[in-house]
Amino acid sequence: MIGLFLMAQAMTLSLPLPPSDWTVLPPLRLAETPDYPAIMTKFVRDEVEAGRCAAPAPVAGKTTIRLDLIVLVATSTNQALRVVPRAIHCPTVEQFAAGVVEKAARDNIIGPAPGSDSWYHTGMTLTWSQ
């Protein structure tokens, strides 16, 4: 069991570090993009209402949260190797979003050019009424 853990750690450590500037990354292109708001809005709203996450002040009776993530894509397999959410001071939402994006990317990424593994940017905006 310890051997498997150490192998997983070694694989994780060999991946390239996320870039510090996400604005220069190309967008993650998916053949089919899921309806992120339909999947995530209720969970995020419940986390905010339970006080586990901070949210911006509502504007015109609506709360809006932007979730940004980057995805490391293996060009050899065209699969997501790693998904990193931008911190919004709500770990449960960050991790849920990362899981949703990882699942959406599975066998669904429109191929990057051959070369080294590359980072891509994606995100979603969730809005709900108060």
Image (cartoon, rainbow, N blue to C red):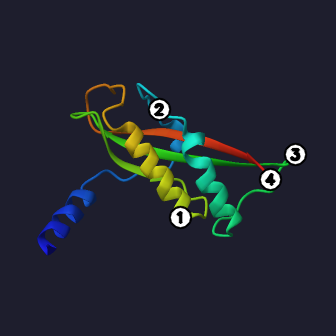
Determine whether, in the image, residue 21 is placed left or right of residue 41: left
**Quarter of the picture holding the N terminus:** bottom left
Query: Would you call the spot at circle 3 few (<14 residues within 10 Å), some (14-19), or many (20 or more)?
Result: few
- The image position of residue 50, as x and y in percent, is 67, 68
Residue type at numbered disc 2? Pro
Which of the two marks, 2 or 1, is nearer to us in this view?
1
Give the answer, above or below, for where 51 lies relative to 22: below
> Is the Cβ of the residue at disc 2 closer than 8 Å to that at disc 1?
no
Q: Nearer the viewer, mark 4 or mark 2?
A: 4
Residue that label 2 marks: 26
In the image, 86 versus 44, the foreground residue is: 44
| Tag shown at residue 60 | 3
Q: What kind of element bears circle 2?
A: loop
First-in-chain label (4 vs 2): 2
Residues packed near mark 1 inside 10 Å, few (<14), some (14 to 19) or many (20 plus): some
Q: Position of residue 11 (x, y in %)?
A: 21, 57
Indicate which disc, 2 or 1, sits on the residue closer to the N terminus: 2
Disc 4 and disc 2: Cα gap in Å?
Answer: 34 Å
- Frontmost residue, 84 versus 128: 128
Residue ID for mark 1: 91
Picture disc at residue 130:
4
Disc 1 marks a residue whose amino acid type is: Pro
Q: Earlier in the sequence, mark 1 or mark 3?
A: 3
Q: Amino acid at mark 3?
A: Ala
Q: Is residue 118 above or below residue 31?
A: below
Give residue 51's position: percent from left, percent from top.
68, 70
